[in-house]
């Protein structure tokens, strides 16, 4: 025992030193939210978008500010304050440009003058003209519903800021806007945009990560006190779990990996996974002590009987997470990688720190109760007898459940919204919805235009006609309001040259178009032309924004758009292609489910190989895998029947759940193998496995469920659903392992009699 203590002491010192190192590196951990990280870097669509962006500008470096004044914006005091607010806002060094109706002018050429006259859309200092101003604004489609809301109660300020602002710069810009809003004291104001969302998401991620860590510690403490009812039973497991968290977060700090939105669930996952390892080992250690074994023998027995199963469960859980590498999304890959590393680190601590503490600490007091007098025996033994009595009905019931689950899984729909991660009552989501309802929407719309004939340019009338056809289709059928393109500029110029009459806001004749384009090239001081036509004059864009209608609706609209292009557009002359951040998100989200389920299939295959290595029986592998596939099908049915869309968060649940849920099966089957190898008859081996592992399986499932249910406190719907759905799967898996797996073994697995006879003789 002396040599064992020396090894334990050295190991403990090494673990402490590493823990200090990782603890120091935690200070380097940062949080990051960038939805462009979800774009596949190897996808041609991403490459196309980057090339398109390099020719023009980014489509999401903006902030919309809505200044609200009920019952009407046509109020001198309000408009004066709005004008002054915009003037100050434009002075911010991070602001590139500001557009607002208070500063916009309409250009008009009348038959009585050769010069082009300008007039403001709103005569702020002349209230007597407000009525005419209002009528003129709502007759101009490029202004109405874009810079003035549908009800005339708000004006929109479009702020273009510097590209790719950091989180701190975004926060500073938002703070500057807040200070100005506080200074001018408008009746109400709302703002939204990528910079606003980034600050909110990152701050919320920080708060929730710290909250989950604190709540996890409280949960674990309560659970341990209830389970072991001793100080030893509290601090020893808590030390392992706490060290696991320090190691994985510190490791992320060491390699400079930020915590993304999905990785905010890491604390809860590592806590419950580490606790699962500890629970199985400590429970077996205490059981051995109750049998009268010495501390040394109890430790050796615990690691001998449970060790291989714990190793396999750690491997299968890590494999489950590593299959997420098949998803070509950096945040998902980072989640899979670092969660798998966390699982491995928790296993290492369970095999280094835990045995060291068991050796060096005083042996805990053991209850004098016989096992058949304990609470768990009184629960598990009748349950096993009930299982034997109704095994046929259980088999039929689970078979029916399989069929129902398969059908329910076919009802699952794959949809995605930009703000799906925020609950409906969330203030930020309600703000975004306000812009969707009252203005043109916040989802960027980008369409690339490419002239395919090298001898022609964007400005050729034939090309312009094709662009006009496309823009008309988009505004009439694609929910695009007030698209901005070379055609839009021509329509405005046509109206300008006809005295500002509404009926002339239309595509001009060839002669007129040539004249207007010549004027654009000579007098475009604002640079508007370069924003929509590149320097080669072979590429252009149609830019706007639309409402957040969801991926399913967008897919339908894209299908109809393709049909229109194929039948109505001269594709030999010009090529139209949708691009932009919103489009890339749709593409990547639509591919997500197939990638995740390919990864899940791979996980099932790898776990089956590990099972085969353990049991050396193909039939046993099939029997063991069926109860783990059933919970996945039941999850699919739950999504289908409840109408919960398949998205990043809900799709991740399948992979996470499988890697964790299979652990209980491995522990059960490992114990069964040990009992069969001892020469026990099948029914006796099954009974001993049920009673021996049942307690640990139930306890670990409870702690796992409690740990994941914590995620339901999140303000992010994705995190909420991960917590809720994984908890449901774990309940399904527990029932399957305790009542379906034994029934399958009874009916379909017969140990080889020759081997069993030989083992009995040897014993």
Image: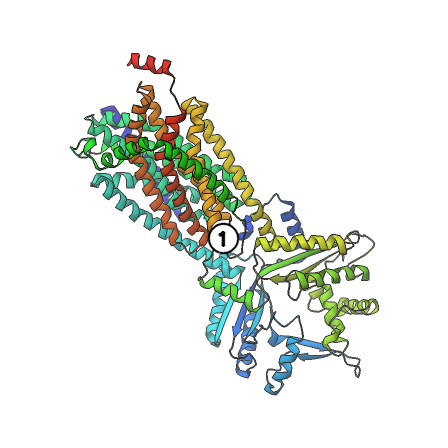
Q: Which residue is mark 1?
A: 33
Disc 1, SS: loop
- Location of residue 500 by image quarter: bottom right
Q: Tell me the colour scheme of the image.
A: rainbow
573 left or right of 238 in image? right
- The vertical placement of 332 against 283, above or below, is below
Residue under the point 67% across and 51% down: 51
In x, y percent, where is residue 391?
35, 32
Residue drawn 30% across the image and 36% down it: 279
Q: Decide: is 89 above or below 610.
A: below
Residue visible at 76% across and 66% down in the picture: 521
Give 138 or 115, whichever is nearer the viewer. 138
Q: Would you say 176 lies left or right of 710 here?
A: right
Position of residue 267 in the picture relative to residue 470 (left or right): left
Residue under the point 22% across and 25% down: 2
Estimate how packed mark 1 is, as few (under 14), some (14 to 19) or many (20 or more) residues with alpha carbons within 10 Å: many
């Amino acid at each position: 025992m002396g040599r064992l203590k020396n090894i334990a002491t050295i190991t403990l010192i090494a673990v402490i030193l590493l823990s200090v190192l990782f603890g120091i590196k935690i200070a380097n951990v940062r949080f990051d939210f960038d939805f462009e990280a979800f774009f596949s870097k190897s996808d041609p669509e991403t490459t196309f978008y980057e090339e398109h962006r390099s020719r023009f500008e980014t489509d999401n470096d903006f902030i919309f500010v809505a200044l609200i004044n009920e019952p009407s914006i046509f109020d001198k005091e309000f408009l004066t304050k709005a004008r002054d607010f915009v003037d100050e806002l434009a002075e911010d060094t991070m602001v590139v440009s500001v557009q607002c109706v208070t500063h916009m002018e309409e250009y008009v050429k009348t038959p009585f003058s050769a010069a082009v006259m300008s007039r403001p859309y709103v005569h702020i200092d002349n209230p007597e003209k407000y009525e005419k101003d209002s009528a003129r604004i709502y007759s101009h489609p490029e202004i109405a519903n874009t810079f003035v809301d549908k009800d005339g109660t708000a004006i929109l300020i479009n702020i273009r800021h510097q590209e790719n602002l950091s989180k701190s710069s975004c926060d500073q810009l938002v703070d500057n806007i807040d200070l100005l809003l506080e200074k001018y004291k408008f009746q109400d104001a709302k703002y939204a945009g990528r910079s606003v969302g980034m600050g909110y998401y990152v701050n919320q991620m920080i708060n929730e990560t710290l909250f989950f860590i604190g709540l996890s510690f409280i949960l674990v403490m309560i659970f341990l006190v209830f389970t072991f009812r001793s100080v030893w039973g509290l601090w020893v497991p808590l030390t392992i779990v706490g060290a696991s968290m320090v190691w994985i977060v510190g490791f992320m700090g060491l390699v400079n990996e930020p915590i993304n939105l999905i990785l905010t669930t890491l604390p809860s996952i590592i806590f419950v996974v580490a606790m699962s390892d500890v629970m199985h080992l400590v429970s077996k250690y205490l059981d051995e002590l109750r049998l009268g074994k010495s501390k040394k023998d109890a430790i050796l027995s615990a690691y001998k009987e449970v060790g291989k199963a714990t190793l396999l469960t750690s491997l299968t859980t890590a494999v489950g997470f590593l299959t997420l590498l098949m998803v070509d999304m950096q945040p998902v890959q980072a989640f899979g990688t670092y969660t798998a590393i966390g699982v491995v680190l928790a296993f290492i601590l369970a095999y280094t720190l835990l045995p060291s503490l068991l050796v060096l600490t005083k042996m805990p007091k053991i209850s004098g109760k016989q096992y058949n007098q304990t609470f768990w025996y009184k629960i598990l033994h009748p349950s096993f007898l009930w299982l034997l009595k109704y095994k046929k009905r259980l088999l039929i019931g689970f078979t029916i459940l399989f069929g129902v689950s398969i059908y329910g899984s076919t009802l699952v729909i794959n949809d995605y919204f930009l703000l799906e991660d925020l609950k409906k009552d969330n203030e930020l989501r309600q703000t975004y919805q306000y812009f969707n309802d009252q203005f043109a929407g916040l989802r960027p719309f980008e369409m690339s235009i490419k002239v395919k004939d090298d001898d022609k340019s964007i400005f050729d009338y034939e090309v312009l006609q094709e662009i006009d056809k496309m823009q008309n289709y988009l505004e009439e059928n694609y929910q695009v309001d007030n698209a901005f393109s070379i055609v839009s500029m021509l329509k405005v110029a046509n109206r300008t040259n006809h005295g500002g009459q509404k009926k002339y806001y239309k595509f001009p004749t060839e002669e007129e178009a040539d004249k207007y384009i010549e004027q654009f090239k000579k007098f475009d001081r604002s640079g508007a032309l370069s924003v929509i036509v590149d320097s080669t004059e072979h590429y252009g864009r149609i830019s706007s924004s639309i409402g957040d209608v969801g991926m399913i609706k967008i897919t339908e609209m894209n299908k109809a758009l393709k049909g229109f292009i194929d039948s109505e557009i001269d594709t030999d002359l010009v090529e139209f292609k949708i691009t932009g951040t919103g489009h890339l998100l749709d593409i990547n989200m639509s591919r997500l489910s197939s990638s995740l389920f390919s990864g899940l299939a791979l996980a099932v295959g790898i776990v089956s190989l590990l099972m085969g290595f353990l049991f050396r029986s193909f039939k046993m592998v099939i029997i063991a895998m069926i109860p783990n596939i059933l919970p996945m099908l039941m999850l699919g049915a739950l999504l289908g029947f409840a109408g919960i869309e398949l998205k990043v968060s809900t799709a991740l649940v399948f992979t996470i759940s499988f890697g964790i849920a299979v652990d209980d099966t491995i522990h059960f089957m490992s114990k069964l193998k040990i009992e069969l190898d001892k020469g026990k008859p099948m029914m006796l081996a099954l009974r001993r496995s049920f009673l021996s592992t049942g307690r640990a399986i139930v306890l670990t499932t409870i702690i796992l469920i409690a740990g994941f249910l914590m995620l339901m406190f999140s303000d992010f719907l994705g995190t909420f659903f991960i917590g809720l759905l994984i908890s449901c799967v774990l309940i399904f898996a527990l029932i399957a392992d305790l009542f379906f797996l034994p029934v399958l073994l009874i009916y379909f697995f017969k140990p080889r009699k020759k081997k069993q006879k030989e083992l009995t003789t040897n014993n």
